[in-house]
Amino acid sequence: MHLDKISTMVDKVFKKSIIKQFEFDEEVASVFDDMLNRSVPFYKEMQRLSINFACNFLEENDKVYDLGCSTASTLIELSKHCKNNLKLIGIDNSSAMLNRASKKAKAFGVEIDLVNADLHDVSFDDAKLILSNYTLQFIRPLQREKLVKKIYDSLQNKGIFIFSEKVISSNSTLNKQSIDEYYEFKKTQGYSEFEISQKREALENVLIPYTEEENKKMILDAGFTHCETIFKWVNFATFIAIKK
Ligand SMILES: Nc1ncnc2c1ncn2[C@@H]1O[C@H](C[S@+](CC[C@H]([NH3+])C(=O)[O-])CC(=O)[O-])[C@@H](O)[C@H]1O
Ligand SMILES: O=C(O)C(=O)Cc1ccccc1
């Protein structure tokens, strides 16, 4: 069975008038896989690259954490593609997401320790790999720097942190063009202008993107010796950071 077959509900969350901020609630969780596939350009390719790079570093019984694991798609794919046995831990603070994660993991026969917690309140001990795709962007800036320091401290020597983020440009003209380009992408995915503008409003002050340079600075400031962009499409980027 393919992973896509499990969540078939189409994202219609922003078709109706919305007055609240964006939340990872039951309604969003029930359509989340479709939302991510249609809202993040090259999501599948970015996930494939994260997993391939990760597998190159992983050894038997290594501990892998996915921070903001949502419906556990990445950990399930990772376990399918890596030849080694891994200890998989998924952390998220949305019960609605973790309910789906648990059902999917069971359906695919993958053992994942799913932890319902705020990323600020848990430790990620003895990790060889920490993954976090499109999650840091939801953490307030000061807290984000602290969390990245904790990620660095939790990794073994030679440990790896792979993460993806929506990014902005420090050049306002390019930034505007990037947003326009992204909205064109969303239209090709079947979202209407109304849905696009409603979601943009709901995400205001909830999703706080950094520039690519700010992300790299945050990583190096935390102590990592190396940080590289392994994938970028306009305003979406995937980074790999290495601890010495
Ligand atoms: N403070 C927090 N503590 C714990 N979880 C949190 C916190 N803040 C947000 N989350 C969780 O982070 C996830 C972000 S989605 C990740 C996609 C996934 N990585 C994927 O590749 O499928 C990205 C997006 O929706 O753009 C949600 O499940 C939140 O509940
Ligand atoms: O959809 C958007 O506008 C985004 O910025 C990406 C996204 C994807 C899924 C949840 C939240 C944000």
Image (cartoon, grey):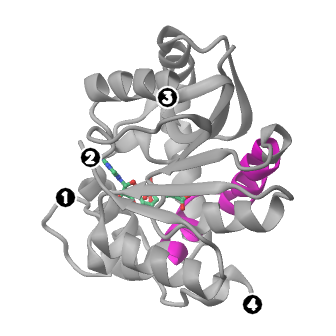
Name the mark nearer the viewer: 4 or 3: 3
Look at 47% across and 29% down and name the residue there. Answer: 151
Which quarter of the figure has residue 41? Answer: bottom right
Q: Earlier in the sequence, mark 1 or mark 3?
A: 1
Looking at the image, residue 77 sits to the left or right of residue 7; the answer is right
- Three-letter amino acid code at disc 3? Ser
Q: Which mark is residue 154?
A: 3
Whether pointer 4 and pointer 2 mark residues with C-beta atoms closer than 8 Å, the reply is no
Whether pointer 1 and pointer 4 mark residues with C-beta atoms closer than 8 Å, the reply is no
Looking at the image, residue 43 sits to the left or right of residue 99; the answer is right
Write down the region rendered in magenta.
Answer: 33-54
Q: Is residue 169 visible?
A: no
Q: Earlier in the sequence, mark 1 or mark 4?
A: 4
Secondary structure state at the residue bearing disc 3 = helix
- Viewer-nearest residue: 90 or 171: 90
- Three-letter amino acid code at disc 4? Met
